[in-house]
Amino acid sequence: MPATTQPIINQPKPVSFLEAVIYWLKLGFISFGGPAGQISMMHQELVERRRWISEQRFLHALNYTMVLPGPEAQQLATYIGWLMHGTWGGIVAGMLFVLPSLFILIALTWIYLVYSELPAVAGILYGIKPAVTAIVVFAAYRIGSRALKNNILRAISVLAFIALFVFNIPFPYIVLMAGLIGYAGSHFMPGQFQTGGHHEQSKNTYGPALIDDDTPVPEHARFKWSRFMAFTLTGFLIWGTVLTLLSANYGWENTLTQMGWFFTKAALVTFGGAYAVLPYVYQGGVEHYAWLNASQMIDGLALGETTPGPLIMIVAFVGFVGGWSKEVFGPDMLFLAGMTGACIATLFTFLPSFLFILLGGPAVEATRDDIKYTAPLTGITAAVVGVIVNLAVFFAYHVLWPDGFGTAFEWFSALIGIAAFTALFKYKAGIVSVISVCAIIGLSYSLLLK
């Protein structure tokens, strides 16, 4: 065979709904590594190995999910499931991406609340806290290096940090202002807000795919007003029914009802992925509603980083701790209260994500990038970098001065944090590995002090 001859790769066989369900369930249990790791897993399995979808179609879908509020990896799974098997394919893919993580987090959060005062557990958490701070700093660097391509976007990021850190402006207003700046920029300086589609940058091919570059859009993925209205009404019916039942049974000011309302807002304004939701959840969950304290928020992020599923599942931790701490069903039913809080937080956080795909997917399949739509989202992404930096400052303060700024400095925590950031930045270590090593160091240090 001549050296230039390429091997013939056959067209993949059609994928049954059951086969897809098995894959999405498996992914829900092994999707560690945050959004980047989860997207990489899906690319390797669906584009390279199974060839369910081509590289261009995969990255075109990814472009859309990355500018939506909410968890991009979960939305990408929903999008691909919807493209392959219609509405139920998308719903099943999205749900199975989340449910294993929800059940695992409910169990871990219960263990955390019951046993966190034990010396061994406290020592592990002592090592994890600075590691989490380093992870957030690294996330700000990673997102910033990709998003802040010019001085205009860098200025938006700095202004967002100042607005939150100095003036404590609520996160939704920062998102709104950044979006308006981006929209104005698309008219007056479009070159500064040009993102460039990822699908145009890739020349990789892995052979024919079931959903190939030139595969026609399936009937269920074509835009229809009747379908659009049906999905919209169904989404509002689910949301309104649950919120109305909570309000009718427990009152509008009840913890569970307020969780439903708060996490609805969180789902709609958190552009930029999971790290963008954290400052908003902190503002609401810690400062406004007092469902949990600052230290618990850091511990929750650590649990989220070390379990499968989207990192935004930290909302389940917040919901569990809030239901537990507020004793919504009385002091004798704390686990039920926590589990209910976790489920409510998860439902109201992820319901909009499904609607974004089912409502917006047909438009994405029918159109390509238009700067009028992408520029506001580019501005918002730039602002999110500043917001994440503010979150890192908040975490660092509570880790290094746990009893207040005027008290003793936690020098050993600082060393752990520096080592964790070095491992992430210089040696490209995995997040789970970094947290595990830091947990061992924290435990060993606490035992030595005894």
Image (cartoon, rainbow, N blue to C red):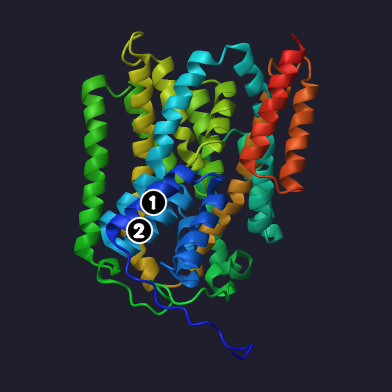
Q: Is residue 116 above or below residue 171?
A: above
Q: Is residue 137 above or below residue 416?
A: below
Disc 2 element: helix
Residue 423 or residue 156, whichever sits in front = 423
Return the x and y of residue 271 as percentages of the image width and height. 50, 49
Image quadrant in which you'd find residue 358: bottom left
Query: Rounded to the nearest whole Å, what is the CA distance between mark 2 and mark 1?
Result: 9 Å
Q: Which residue is mark 2?
A: 81
Disc 1 element: helix
Residue 109 or residue 30, whichever sits in front = 30
Residue 182 or residue 348, whichever sits in front = 348
Dot 1, how many residues are within 10 Å of its Cα: few (below 14), some (14-19), or many (20+)?
A: many
Residue 128 appears left or right of 23: right
Q: Quadrant of the C terminus?
A: top right
Q: Residue furthest bottom?
A: 2
Image quadrant in which you'd find residue 238: top left
Q: Which residue is mark 1?
A: 24
Residue 321 appears left or right of 245: right
Q: Is residue 222 above or below residue 68?
A: below
- Seen at 41% across and 55% down, the residue is 77
- Seen at 62% across and 89% down, the residue is 4
Image quadrant in which you'd find residue 316: top left
Label 2 vs 1, first from the N-terminus: 1
- Seen at 38% across and 70% down, the residue is 365
- Seen at 77% across and 14% down, the residue is 448
- Quick check: can you spot residue 268? no
Q: Pointers 2 and 1 in contact (CB under 8 A)?
A: yes
